Image (cartoon, rainbow, N blue to C red):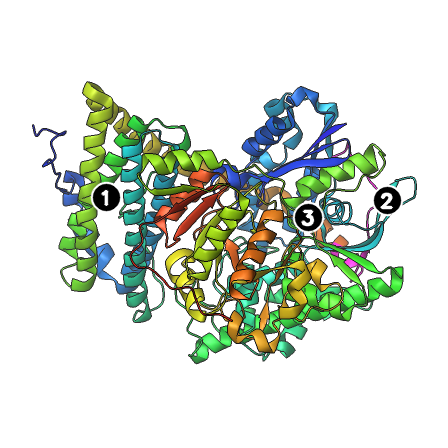
Amino acid sequence: MADVSHGTFHMRASPSAVDVLLTPVHRWVWSDLDRRARKLLTFGQTEEDGARDISRAAERTADPALRILYLRHAADEQRHAVLFRKRGREILDSSRPPVFEANWLAPGERGLDGLDVGSESDQDLLAFLHLSEKAAAGRFVLYEEVLAVDPQTRAVFARILKDEENHMTYTRRELARLAQRREGWRLWRARAGRLWNAYLRVASAIASVFGTAMLALQYFLILPAFAALAKRSARREREGFAASRAETAFGGQY
Amino acid sequence: MRILGISAHYHDSAAALVVDGVPVCAVQEERLSRSKNDASFPLAAIGWCLEHGGLEPGDLDAVVFYEKPMLKFDRILTMALREFPASWGSFPRAMKNSLGGKLWVKGLITSQLGVPGKRVLFSEHHQSHAAAAFLTAPTRRAAILTADGVGEWATLSLGRGSISESGDAKIELFRELRFPHSLGMLYSTFTAYLGFKVNEGEYKVMGLASYGSPAFEPLMRKIVRRAADGAPVLDLSYFEYHRGARRSFSDRLAAELGPPRDPDAAIDLATPEGKRYADIAASVQRVLEDILVDLARSLREETGLDDLCLGGGVALNGCANARILRESGFRNVYVPSAPGDAGCAMGAALAADRLHFKRPHVEAPDHPYWGPPIDGAQLTRIAREDGLELAETAGEAELLDRVSLELARGRIVGWMQGRTEFGPRALGNRSILAAPHSAAMRDRLNRGIKYREQFRPFAPAVPLSKADRFFELPPGGARLGRFMSGVFPVRPEWRDRLAAVTHVDGTARVQTVDPEAAPRFHALLEAYGARTGIPVLLNTSFNLAGEPIVNRAVEGYTTFRRSGIDVLVAGETVVEKPRTRELAPEAVA
């Protein structure tokens, strides 16, 4: 295993096995010009959000070396946002009306995955950042491959990929410095955290669909009679100003 | 008596503390959570207010929420019923939102703060707006006009406030416009149609309006007509916000105005499409202004009063405010620094103090600086750790001399002093400052720091006593400029030399700086004037696009490091970025 603390240590990104298997899906997702543009613009937003979060991390760390690295990282993310947006807009200007974006099939990157930067230790944050950067960089390698037909967009990914690899490297190196021999544990915890977040996303999406279905059912079964009354009452309302309510008690919620 | 005011759950949550009738502190949650327009229950803001006031939750005599949640739920449910079956898409979401948390405010407050339920009070939304406007204004009798998107049912209220010799305060709201008819929702709908974020992009519509002509005014007048009693009534066939969650405007609006702007596409004002967007913005702005002026004029005739207090999010429209001042007959128009929902935290606390507990009125200090103070030592420590060039100035005179020189050299300064402002505008305590003379400076700020559309103007700050020299202020204009609430013409002879802050139509949203309210900022303007002959600075909020205004020194520092700001000042500490080239003082006079 490479010496993480050594100055020459540098990590290379590679797509995950799942993503490699899903290459045809990624190819389909990126094949449409408008979808490509929208995804790039979404990536731009994600990078901008990431820049803000990493900036927050720079504000709260007590480690001056880490602060500088976070600030550089945040500046990179800001630059990536500009690159993604610029290319997205270029494509959009020459594309057709919007189509299904398919973010669920090819999410690209999730930024910091909703991580609460303010409540994490530097070590946990570095582990989380490392995995996020690694996942995004791996996908970007794949996107480069499936975007062979669009050299300009491909060049954007190639340029950003270099930075992502640098981010992977520095987060791993700093984690090794701060966590000493417990870096593996931190990384596994971060992996578990990402898995938990994924579970929460899926679970809340399912719960939301279920809740929506139940409420929609109630809407159509219970509300019609009340709706008729409400409509009748609305028709009786006078147009224009209404008298303000008489002074109500501060103790009441109604 | 110690009263905590809270606004939360829709946009821009905040907390404010009033002790013995006087505001002590107030802060928006976003300034502490660092999440722009944070609408969550403002635990951090409450925590800071209590800490600042040296109080524990148990010491509070009352906690006042800024609106009545059950009455709001009544409106949401009633609208869902009235719009049946078209409301089927929005109903589940609205119910999940309300029943999942927003309805149970009393329980939330008692469980989070540990205060007994009987100490939790509720003001009405527009009463909170009215109180925030009237009870903080330096007047004892005034007409009141509040307008926003929607509170519980009311979207616009007209009334009057008075304070008797003995200090008894009274706020009497005569009549109101009710949802779905709403001037705030009208403007927000066009904000969305023009591809900007609602509750954030309304400034952009106002800025864009100056590039257009009101070519769509006839259609706008069809969309908003006037009822027999003068109330603005919307033709709801052009809107969807009252029934659907998908978007706020209807297909009919898009059919008659043309396709809405894609939020991701840039606005090119040189193209017919760009011009169409500007014309639409100009048309909705014109109609909004006309209606507000007309309502204010009627209110003036009805009340016979000289002063008007404006509240609600619509009062952030500086062009409309200036026209109200010029054309309605009121001598003074007062707009608080936070007329939107955040300000309702203070309004609710003051309303409870004066109207519920019937305590005598105490004049509120007339400034917007109610938030956390700056700690220059924090910047000193960080800059030292990062090996930046650092100067701790020997005193105020040296600080002002140094900063005014940097500004005159064309450098951009991040300026943090005293306590942070309450409200959406940076008024000289958390500001980015620059020389206002050339359009190149405006472009540099837009490109390298604010990353925003070229059509958006920057605002000037000027000493109160010198404002008339540079700007055409009507009587009462200087007061409206105190919290940057009015847009006024720049005098033609100064427009070329104030190019960075003069909008395309020759106007500026000027801040008139009172030495008593902001002594150091005022002194800096004077120092800059002594050096250049023009005591005017470009003043824009100290934040990057999509971020809240900075609060602590460390936040200013990270913003400084990530942007094109050249010099950072926090208290007495001055930090510079390494210089790439020495600039000559700008020739301005």
Residue A150, by quadrant, is bottom left
Q: Which residues are magenta?
A: A234-254
Residue B405 as seen in the image, left or right of residue B233: left
Chain for numbered disc 2: B
Q: Callout 1 environment at 10 Å: few (<14), some (14 to 19), or many (20+)? A: many
**Mark nearer the N terminus (3 vs 2):** 2
Image quadrant where one finds the N terminus of chain B: top right
Residue A61's spot in the image, x, y percent?
35, 31
Front residue (pair A44, A78): A78
Q: Residue at x 87, y 48 (%)?
A: B162
Q: Helix, strand or loop at disc 3?
A: loop
Gap in angstroms between the C-alphas marked 2 and 1? 60 Å
Image position, residue B68 (x, y; %): 71, 39
Chain letter of the residue beneath label 3 in the structure image: B
- Residue A181: which quarter of the image? top left
Mark closer to the observer (1, 3)? 3
Residue at the image position 18 percent from the left and 31 percent from the top: A173
Q: Can you identify the residue that label 2 sits on?
A: B170
- Position of A11 with respect to A253 (left or right) is left
Residue A145 seen: yes
- Indicate the position of residue B438 as horizontal and vertical percent values: 46, 70
Q: Which percent across, then down, holds residue B368? A: 64, 46
In reply to whether residue A241 is colored magenta, the answer given is yes
Above or below, B32 relative to B2:
below
Q: Number of numbered discs present?
A: 3
Circle 3 sits on which residue?
B516
Q: Is residue B53 above or below residue A236?
A: above
Report the predominant secondary structure element of the magenta stretch: loop
Q: Identify the residue under disc 1.
A: A136
Q: CA distance from mark 3 to mark 2?
A: 29 Å
The three-letter amino acid code for the residue at tag 1 is: Ala
